[in-house]
């Protein structure tokens, strides 16, 4: 459970950032980074509200003084909260990132690669990229595109790896060790039907295949490799204790037959190792010292240890990480693959895939992703993190971007007696040295359709320009006494730019932008005031439309 001092630290920090008033939602977001689990939220919410109540009773000066006691601790947690020491480091650290190439990587997939990268930097070690392209289940097909997409994403993230390996190049090595396991009496070729196997496992009963003579088993293994048996007819199983408390550990599958075509080897191989068989060999052969993997692979890790013991190999440190659940994003590589193949998504960089390619296209910075991932470190329990936390990290990097006006769903209005003027608006209010945008105005303007209903109700302030009420000009300078509603705007002009913005849900927002947008280069990140950050993706010269991708608010 989260300590009260940590809750107080986040409450004070949030209060100082928001004029002395801490908000429950913001504090909870911070606590998720500290390891708070969604299932425990009800238990802690009362205490959070109680502490926030006490913090909000303090004045801003008192909050700042009190926060100094926590500041160093909170800063350290935010920057490297989970990068604890690796266990049993003796000599050079070697780690591996081993994605299955079913599609583009998303943040959850990249988490291991980023943490590995941080650790090998810390210890002066190295990371290997191993494409785990053994043929898996029919539901999990290998994507040919993934062979390019994976290294491309890692390069963008700044992740270094010494060498790249492909499991599909190493089949003969796995065959050699498969034969050794059979010769040692540790594995056997099994012809039992699936239903019989399930019952045997459940009852802890050995099948007749397990009791064959070694000579016969080796012949069967040879026949498997030579293509004598059909898919599903023969498999190789590891001899574990059939009375093991975990039925899933009893006589695990090591090799199976598949007639499916492989993107790299075509149909050269029919016998494919399971994940635990290939990894038990490669983790030893490639010299791994520490393996960081998902908690869902604990049974596979146990099988690896079992095989290492058979060969009398030095055990390797296995470290398990809980699943990263991004709240506010539906991330599924298999679903994305299905939608990409069907044409529903435009490709692997469609914003709805939440792939690293799509985040890059949106303007999410690799440094933001790295800081976001490091903040959780290694956590054996499932981590729930608001997507907004990633955006906060990204905003720190891009918040100095130049600003422009964009009018969504524009409608034309006329302001009586509005002066004709040349309005100079800074590209960034905190960096006037960058220059200005110039907008020539008359008495006709564009505003967003959603804002038109507000005009009849109160005084309006056009940002950087004029005040008016009931469509009639009042004054030029900002006047706090008016209590005016601030709106962005554009002058009616033939020089305005047509703008389209692709949103994270795949929808398109259309409108008009100011003429200075024409000076932007492709991939420029800017802020549309009162709309959000966007990245210039392309320019449709035929339609004269500037096409942006939405980054975040």
Image (tube, rainbow, N blue to C red):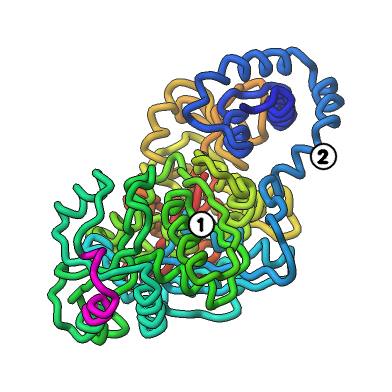
Which residue, given by chain and number where applicable, does mark 2 sit on?
72
Find the distance from the CA under tag 1 to the CA under tag 2. Answer: 31 Å
Location of mark 1 (residue): 293
Q: Position of residue 270 (x, y in %)?
A: 23, 79
Q: Nearer the viewer, residue 243 or 362?
A: 243
Q: Are marks 1 and 2 in contact (CB under 8 Å)?
A: no
Rendered position, 439 above or below 379: below
Q: Residue at x 67, y 62 (%)?
A: 119
Image quarter in which the N terminus is found: top right
Which of the pair 277/321 is nearer the observer? 277
Residue 507 location, x and y as percent? 32, 50
The quadrant holding residue 75 is: top right
The image quarter containing residue 114 is bottom right
Position of residue 181 measured from the top left corner of the image (x, y, whole percent): 39, 73
Q: Residue at x 49, y 53 (%)?
A: 551
**Badge 1 element:** strand
226 over 501 or under it: above or below: below
Give, as a single range, the part of the protein colored magenta.
209-220
Picture residue at 71% right of the left edge, 32% below the top:
17
């Amino acid at each position: 459970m989260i300590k009260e001092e940590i809750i107080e630290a986040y409450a004070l920090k949030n209060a100082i950032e928001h004029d002395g008033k801490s908000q429950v939602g913001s504090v909870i977001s911070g606590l998720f980074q500290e390891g708070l689990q969604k299932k425990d939220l009800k238990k802690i919410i009362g205490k959070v509200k109680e502490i926030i109540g006490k913090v909000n009773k303090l004045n801003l000066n008192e909050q700042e003084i009190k926060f100094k006691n926590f500041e160093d601790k909170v800063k350290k947690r935010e920057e490297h909260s989970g990068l604890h020491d690796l266990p049993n480091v003796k000599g050079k650290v070697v780690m591996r990132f081993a994605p299955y190439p079913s599609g583009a990587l998303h943040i959850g997939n990249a988490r291991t690669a980023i943490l590995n990268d941080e650790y090998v930097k810390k210890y002066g070690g190295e990371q290997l990229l191993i494409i785990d392209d053994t043929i898996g289940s029919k539901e999990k097909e290998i994507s040919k595109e993934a062979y390019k997409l994976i290294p491309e994403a890692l390069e963008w993230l700044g992740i270094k790896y010494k060498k790249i390996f492909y499991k599909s190049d190493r089949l003969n090595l796995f065959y050699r060790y498969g034969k050794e396991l059979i010769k040692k009496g540790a594995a056997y070729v099994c012809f039992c039907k699936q239903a019989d196997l399930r019952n045997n496992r459940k009852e802890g009963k050995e099948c007749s295949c397990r009791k064959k003579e070694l000579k016969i088993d080796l012949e069967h293994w040879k026949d498997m490799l030579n293509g004598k048996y059909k898919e599903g007819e023969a498999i190789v199983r590891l001899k574990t204790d059939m009375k093991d408390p975990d039925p899933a550990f009893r006589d695990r599958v090591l090799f199976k037959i598949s007639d499916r075509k492989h993107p790299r080897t075509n149909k050269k191989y029919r016998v494919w190792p399971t994940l635990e068989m290939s990894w038990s060999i490669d983790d030893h052969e490639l010299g791994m010292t520490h393996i960081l993997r998902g908690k869902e692979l604990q049974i596979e890790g146990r099988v690896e240890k079992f095989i290492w013991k058979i060969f009398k190999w030095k055990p390797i440190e296995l470290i398990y990480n809980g699943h990263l659940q991004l709240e506010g994003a539906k991330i599924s590589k298999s679903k994305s693959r299905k939608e990409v193949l069907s044409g529903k998504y435009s490709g692997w960089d469609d914003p709805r895939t939440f792939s690293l390619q799509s985040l890059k296209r949106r303007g999410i910075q690799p440094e933001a992703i790295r800081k976001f991932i490091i903040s959780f470190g290694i956590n054996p329990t499932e981590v729930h993190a608001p997507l907004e936390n990633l955006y906060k990290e990204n905003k720190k990097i891009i918040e100095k971007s130049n600003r422009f006006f964009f009018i969504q769903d524009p409608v034309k209005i006329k302001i009586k007696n509005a002066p004709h003027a040349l309005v100079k608006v800074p590209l960034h209010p905190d960096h006037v040295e960058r220059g200005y945008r110039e907008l020539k105005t008359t008495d006709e303007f564009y505003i967003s359709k959603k804002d038109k209903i507000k005009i009849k109700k109160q005084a309006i302030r056009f940002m950087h320009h004029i005040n008016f009420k009931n469509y009639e000009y009042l004054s030029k300078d900002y006047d706090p006494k008016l209590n005016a509603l601030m709106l962005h705007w554009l002058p009616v002009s033939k020089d305005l730019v047509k703008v389209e913005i692709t949103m994270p849900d795949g929808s398109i927002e259309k409108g008009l932008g100011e003429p200075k947008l024409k000076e932007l280069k492709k991939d420029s990140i800017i802020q549309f005031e009162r709309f959000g950050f966007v990245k210039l993706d392309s320019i449709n010269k035929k339609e004269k439309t500037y096409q942006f991708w939405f980054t975040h608010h």
